[in-house]
Image: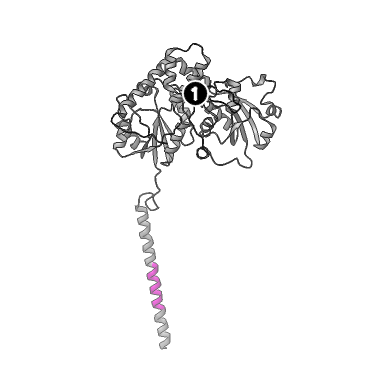
Amino acid sequence: MGSEASQSENATLSSRVVATWLIGGVALGLSLLGFRLACPEGAWSKKKKRPIRVYMDGCFDMMHYGHCNALRQARALGDQLVVGVVSDEEITVNKGPPVTPLSERMIMVSAVKWVDEVIPDAPYAITEDFMKKLFDEYNIDYIIHGDDPCVLPDGTDAYALAKKAGRYKQIKRTEGVSSTDIVGRMLLCVRERSTGDTHSHASLQRQFSHGHSQKSEDGTAWSGTRVSHFLPTSRRIVQFSNGKGPGPDARIVYIDGAFDLFHAGHVEILRLARSLGDFLLVGIHTDQTVSATRGAHRPIMNLHERSLSVLACRYVDEVIIGAPWEVTKDMITTFDISLVVHGTVAEYSDYQKEAENPYAVPISMGILKVLESPLDITTSTIIRRIVSNHDAYLKRNEKKVESEKRYYEGKSYISGD
């Protein structure tokens, strides 16, 4: 009897313990549910880290691979890159008339693979109001600029306020290229073609560039327009490359050309070409090929400079550096090309009249498609803009030299690599 009573008491005790645990568990569950409902959305889970947004602005006039490299460096300092493109009016006031209008500069900047967002009509100098707008409306964390000075007409630093706010970061300038140098190359090109060289034209050429003749591999003299100081490295090419090839069933589109003085017309035809497939392969002709078809004064930019400008374009997946003039059957097979395209606007459009049409093979295979070029712009268009307004650009360069002189007075400055 005693054993049975003891077992009964133990059973009763166990039941009470279980009931207590059940009641306590329900109470705890209700408490946690109430706490969860009372918390604001997202507070219960781990807070998601906000992306770091950086801002860089510029004129981006006659945009080149140096601009693209600056944007690449800026993007590496954050998660999202917002770029401000200075208005035509602001450039005219602070530097002189731009070569390329805002509409074309917007196309160029938007097409750079490292750019996430673009702000048109940005001010030349960072004012307090605009800086507040960047921080409050665009959620910008840092303002970026190169280590070369950006000087206002009064000689002051355009980024002084950003530096004072502690929200300024600096990148290295890309050596070996500048818009000023490129203008010099263009003027040398025109001088060689013109017998009547005016005093102002020669003066502008001297201020913009210090060119000299070079020789090609076969010993023949090349034009003095090749005054590039760019030294290509495999590291730089890797930095600009996508680093991945086409998929197994990708439709590969091929387009070739000189792509000299990479401009908005180039960007737009590349955009159309990319839309026709899954992978865009761009062939870039050698300097010798360009000279043979367009004259000894071309190209303005050398092969590796032109390659980097094309690689920086978001519509381009891969380039052939030094592509052959003729699109051969072997080339089509090697790169598994599905479609070859060509624009209606080009510097050289007489290929169909040649005895040996460079597109004869893709034509015979039924894979050549001629695209209507969205913009009527060529490299010659850019050169004509410079030449027709050379007096204004002479004054523009003199203004730049004077502003930098005032900036450097009392300062020591070492240029970046």
Residue 237 painted magenta: no
Q: Position of residue 225 (x, y in %)?
A: 51, 23
Q: Nearer the viewer, residue 379 or 414?
A: 414
Q: Nearer the viewer, residue 375 or 242?
A: 242
Q: Nearer the viewer, residue 201 or 358?
A: 201
Which range of residues does the magenta coloring cover? Answer: 11-22
Location of residue 295 with respect to 305 vertically, above or below: above
Would residue 160 appear left or right of 353 to someone viewing this image? left
Location of residue 76 with respect to 105 vertically, above or below: below
Location of residue 283 with respect to 19 vertically, above or below: above
Where does the N terminus fall, quadrant-wise? bottom left
Residues packed near mark 1 inside 10 Å, few (<14), some (14 to 19) or many (20 plus): few
Would residue 351 appear left or right of 212 to someone viewing this image? right
Label 1 sits on what residue type?
His
Would residue 135 appear left or right of 308 to someone viewing this image? left
Residue 139 in view (yes/no) = no
Q: Most prominent secondary structure in the magenta stretch?
A: helix
Residue 384 in view (yes/no) = yes
Q: Position of residue 94 (x, y in %)?
A: 35, 23
Residue 12 painted magenta: yes
Quarter assignment of residue 93: top left
Outermost top residue: 196
In the picture of the structure, the residue carrying the numbered disc 1 is 212
Q: Residue at x 64, y 32 (%)?
A: 339
